[in-house]
Image (spheres, rainbow, N blue to C red):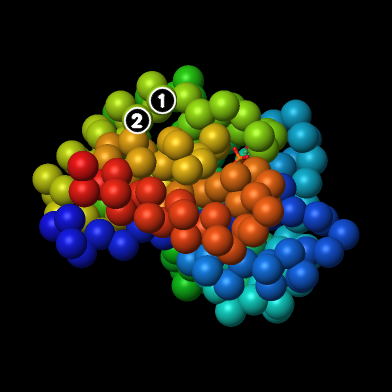
Amino acid sequence: MASSYQPLIAPSILSADFARLGDEIARIPAADWIHVDVMDGHFVPNLTIGAPVAKAIGKVTDKPMDCHLMIEDPLRWAGDYADAGAYNVTFHVEATDDPRAVADLLHSKGCKAGISIKPNTPVEPYLDLLEHIDLVLVMSVEPGFGGQSFMPDMLDKVRTLRAEIDRRGLDVVIQIDGGIDARTIGESAAAGCDVFVAGSAVYGAPDPDAMIETLREGALTGRAG
Ligand code: DX5
Ligand code: ZN
């Protein structure tokens, strides 16, 4: 099992220079996915970018675009991100009464669908959704801002998910987002994460692309135990 583990590093452009997004993405050829944080100023107390900018980003990279929607009413808006060229669209379960409908909408557009849970949201009520989604994003900070400290208690949710996904033999990836750096990525990988979002760790590094490789090594080492 351990030898087939291929951690994916998804730098968050939230920590990039928004005036130079194309150049900032070109600086990270080692990235596996490009993580795009969409905030609406309602679901979270911050406002970032929307579908037109996501579409522009999709045009300047061949890498899978991973849109993290921190917005209200994802059933109304998620399809726009699939149409913008996203590989995966993740929405928050706290923002919708019908996560299954949002996932089905994304799948109907040929896009992968992820659910995300905030730090105070338990994972158990959502385990029934695992058959209908492709990804679970466990937030390891309160969503809204980059540069916050990692919350290690969130790894209990990762362990629960890892056990359940493996027990059912599902093809669902576990992503973690918030405070991931060279120090915290190892324990996250050991807990069972597959995809690691890192904003300030990557774009705050003198060499962002080298940091991606450092993070990848950290994940591999952490999973190997
Ligand atoms: C926070 C965003 C994250 C953020 C992570 O709400 O979802 O993707 O960019 O930033 P760091 O890695 O700095 O915690
Ligand atoms: Zn994010």
Q: Nearer the viewer, residue 217 or 32?
A: 217
Q: Secondary structure at mark 2?
A: helix
- Between 21 and 125, the one lying in front of the other is 21
Up/down of 207 relative to 30, above or below: above
Q: Is residue 88 visible?
A: no
Q: Quadrant of the N terminus?
A: bottom left
Q: Which quadrant does the C terminus fall into?
A: top left
Tell me where residue 125 sits by quadrant. top left
Disc number for residue 184: none
**x 67%, y 63%: residue:** 80
Residue tagged by mark 2? 155
Q: Position of residue 24 (x, y in %)?
A: 73, 64
Q: Amino acid at mark 1?
A: Pro
Dots 2, 1 in contact, CB < 8 A = yes
Q: Would you name the residue on which mark 1 appears?
A: 152
Q: Is residue 210 left or right of residue 71?
A: left
Quarter where residue 71 is shown: top right
